[in-house]
Image (cartoon, rainbow, N blue to C red):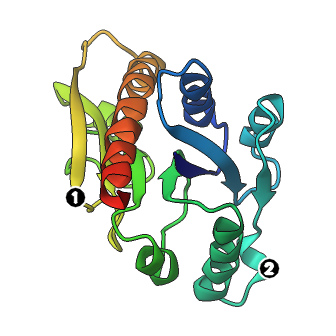
Amino acid sequence: MVNIAVFASGNGSNFENILTQIEQQALKNVTCKLLLVDRENAYAIQRANNHRISWIYMNPKAFHNKEEYETEILEKLKEHNIDLIVLAGYMRFIGKVLLGHFPYRIINLHPAYLPQFPGAHSIRDAFEAHVSYTGVTVHYVDEGVDTGEIIRQEKLEIDPKWNLEELEMHVHALEYELFPKVIQIVADKLEEESK
């Protein structure tokens, strides 16, 4: 069984989608042990409560630096025997402490077809650039901004008639489809390696 911790900063719709996939056994040999949020009022907390998932709020401002913040997070991850960190709308860069302890075991969902449109506003950026396609990427996390090794990505042709909200809706639908599949691929690989 692969124990995952999901990190989120806001709404948590991808987090909930992951939980649903686990509950319906569409995601096999994966269990979500923990939700970590960096915003006190993140709606993801409500979703965790609804599914009876343990959660913690870690206030980055309560620490002197990123290293202290991540060292505290690391302690919580060890308490829950976490094998894999899943970033689902977590709006903070991962630093050396977590990267050092979880090599190739931190994955991120990015709502664009990387390397195009990295960063925080990728759907809007793609919309404003009037490109013919965008997409969704799941990648391993490194020290760069959305620069880690790509695990899987899907393209989305953009209908020129769509407004920004419609584009967001289509991108999110693709996220819900792709992310659990990639979590399964990575989890299976970790299971294999641990044998």
Q: Residue at x 82, y 55 (%)?
A: 40
Residue at the left extreme of this rendering = 132
| Category of crowding for the residue at label 1, using alpha-carbon neighbours closer than 10 angstroms: few (below 14), some (14–19), many (at least 20) | few
Q: Nearer the viewer, residue 115 or 181?
A: 181
| Category of crowding for the residue at label 2, using alpha-carbon neighbours closer than 10 angstroms: few (below 14), some (14–19), many (at least 20) | few
Marks 1 and 2 sit apart, C-alpha to C-alpha, by: 32 Å
> From the viewer's perspective, is residue 133 above or below residue 129?
above
* Mark found first going from the N terminus, 1 or 2: 2
Could one spot residue 185 in this view of the protein? yes
| Quadrant in which the C terminus is drawn | bottom left
Q: Nearer the viewer, residue 193 or 180?
A: 193
In this rendering, which labeled residue sits more in front, label 1 or label 2? Answer: 1
The residue under label 1 is 149
| Image location of residue 30, percent across then percent down | 52, 39
> Of helix, strand and loop, which one carries label 1?
loop
> As shown in the figure, which amino acid type bears the numbered disc 2?
Ala
| Image location of residue 25, percent across then percent down | 53, 22
- Quarter-of-image position of residue 140: bottom left
- Quarter-of-image position of residue 91: bottom right
Give left or right: position of 52 versus 77: right
Q: Residue at x 43, y 31 (%)?
A: 180
Q: Residue at x 77, y 69 (%)?
A: 59
Q: Nearer the viewer, residue 60 or 102?
A: 102
The residue under label 2 is 62
| Image location of residue 141, percent across then percent down | 36, 62
